[in-house]
Image: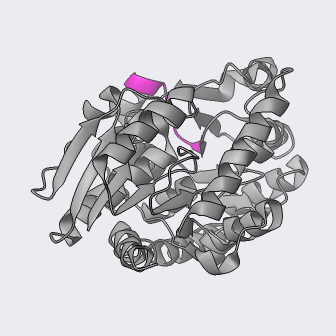
Amino acid sequence: MKIGIDARFYRSSTGGIGRYTRALLKNIAALDKKNKYVIFLTPLDMKEYDIKAENFSEVVVPISHYSFAEQTKFLKILNEAKLDLVHFTNFNHPVFYKGKFIVTVHDLTLMLYPQSKNKYSWLKKSAFRLVMQNAVKAAKCVISDSDATKKDLIKYLSANAEKIKTIYLGIDDEYRRTAKTSLDTLEKKYKIKTPYLLFISQWRPHKGIGELVEAFETLKTKYNIAHKLVIVGKSNPNFPSIAQTIQSSKWAKDIIVTGFVDDGDLPAIYKHADLFVFPSHYEGFGLPPLEAMAGGTPVAASNVSCIPEILGAGAMYFDPYKPAEMAKKIYDVISQKNLKNDLIKKGLEISQKYHWQKTASETLELYEKANTQ
């Protein structure tokens, strides 16, 4: 087969989809020497692209996601490539592409939680819905990151359940190893001091940052904890209220905002945390709490969406809409040694279920299936 893979999310700045794309390609390159692959990347992706495989060839396409050029110029490039199958690693794709393709739909965030609330947000939401609907209807197979996302596709987009296969993501090996970055380095680069509670994710309202800050205030005033709160991630200009919530907190001096963090430093940031907190209202999979578990850090997380499905018995759960409950559950973990150690043990066991090689292997099986349809 001649398989095209849309890897325009390859670069590290694209977050979780980028991590998925990089890990998938690297593991496919290691597992499959038979099929030929054409990898589509933007110039920014090419700066980080480091895969050397004889059956891989790269095509640079200066075409951004969710753009008009994606629907026109990228369509032309795909047609000229004469591919047997294309894998779009996110739902966005040229809707008039008539060749065989599969698509990964990580979640319905952009449809259910639009980027902004300006007068055009309804238009973007409608556009995302149309592109997603075409993706799940026209694709030979659809990959979902979790059964929860599969249910969302059926509920909101009337997707055919028989076409959807849940393929879980994996955890990068560096999160299972001893962290290389020292605590001194973390303090110099990011002003991080122990003990601290940790949050890592995008800055968007549905990630629960506002509720987390409120819970942290309760932890400081009611439970008198000594911890700092470390928030990793970049401020989102579409949602200025999140930064305002942090800055206006009466405990702002104990909230450390690192900004974007180098991937190489993340394992150490997880490792030195007393607890990882994941208060998200909605996820398609949720890599950060698993990465924390893999390094031996206990996790407290939301009891909604796919999160219990993925984390199983490895986390302490709370209602993300109730900051007081969140604070109580966090305090229980950091103050009870036996509970904390139990969560660490169970978290390590849960994290062993998730490997990128398995993700790639199951995806390769789907390529074969889709090509025969």
Can residue 63 be seen at all in this image of the molecule?
yes
Taking depth in this image into account, of 92 and 230 the one nearest to the observer is 92
Q: Where, quadrant-wise, is the N terminus in this rendering?
A: bottom left
Q: Residue at the spot x=67%, y=39% of the render?
A: 226
**Left or right, 283 with reference to 24:** right
Q: Residue at x 56, y 51 (%)?
A: 274
Q: Is residue 117 left or right of residue 82?
A: right
- Can you say whether 204 is above or below 341 in the image? above
Counting labels gives: 0
Residue 248 against residue 331 in the figure, above or below:
above
Between 269 and 282, the one nearer to me in the picture = 282
Q: Quadrant of residue 177?
A: bottom left
Taking the image as drawn, is residue 49 in sight?
Answer: no
Q: In x, y percent, where is residue 145?
A: 57, 65
Residue visible at 72% across and 46% down in the picture: 130
- Residue 193, magenta (yes or no): yes
Position of residue 93 measured from the top left corner of the image (x, y, whole percent): 53, 46
Magenta segment boundaries in residue numbering = 188-198
Question: Percent from the top left, x then y, of residue 78?
Answer: 38, 45
Camera-side residue: 67 or 281?
Answer: 67
In this view, 338 is above or below 290 = below
Colouring rule applied to residues: one colour
In reply to whether residue 334 is colored magenta, the answer given is: no
Q: Position of residue 273 (x, y in %)?
A: 52, 48
**Residue in the image at 79% along x and 39% along y:** 126
